[in-house]
Each structure stands twice: as structure tokens, then as C-alpha cells.
Image (spheres, helix red, strand yellow):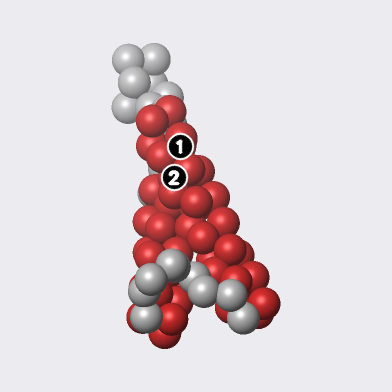
Amino acid sequence: MSPSGGTLAVMESPPAVFTGAVCTLFGMALLLWTATRLRRGEPVAAGAHPIAAAVLSVLFGVAFVTTGLGLLLSL
């Protein structure tokens, strides 16, 4: 309770909002880029095993989206 008798308003942390937005957008862009490369039959990473590169790219994309959404929803 605040001194005036009302409830305290929780302020959003600007760095958390920025970080959540950046992580979510980067993860979505990574997933979109990976899907586009795979659909065209092009390599995801030069010099890497095609399946391993695709799987790691998808896992990192999902991890970034999940982290970003977690930050945004925890506010």
C-alpha cells in the first residue's frame, strides 16, 4: 500500500522491455531465415553439416523467442 492508501503501481522496466522485444524479434527472424533457406534447398551455414546447422538454428530461434516472450510476459 502506498502512503495515500492506494495500491502501488508496478512500473515496467525499460531495459527488460527492450531486451524482450529484441530477443523475440531476433528469434523470429532466425526461424524465418532458416525456414526460407531450407525451403529453397540452400545451406543454412557455410561449411557445416546441413542437418546439424538447421537443427541448431531452429533450437536457438526457439530459445530466443521463448526468452523474449518470458521477459515480456513477466512484466
Q: Quadrant of the N terminus?
A: top left
Q: How many marks?
A: 2
Residue 64 higher or lower than 4, as above or below: below
Camera-nearest residue between 37 and 63: 37
Q: Amino acid at mark 1?
A: Val
- Relative image position of residue 29 (x, y in whole percent): 56, 56
Q: Residue at x 44, y 67 (%)?
A: 45
Camera-nearest residue between 31 and 4: 31
Q: Which residue is mark 2?
A: 20
Q: Residue at x 50, y 51 (%)?
A: 26
Q: Which residue is mark 1?
A: 17
- Say what secondary structure mark 1 lies in: helix
Residue 1 higher or lower than 29, as above or below: above
Q: Taking 59 as reference, is 35 left or right?
A: right
Q: Taking 53 as reference, is 28 left or right?
A: right
Q: Quadrant of the C terminus?
A: top left
Q: Residue at x 43, y 67 (%)?
A: 46
* Quadrant in the rendering for residue 41: bottom right
Q: Are there few (<14), some (14-19), or many (20+) residues within 10 Å of tag 1?
A: some
Marks 1 and 2 close (CB-CB < 8 Å): yes
Q: Residue furthest top?
A: 4
- Relative image position of residue 61 (x, y in whole percent): 45, 64
- Say what secondary structure mark 2 lies in: helix
- Relative image position of residue 13 (x, y in whole percent): 39, 30
Q: Residue at x 54, y 50 (%)?
A: 25
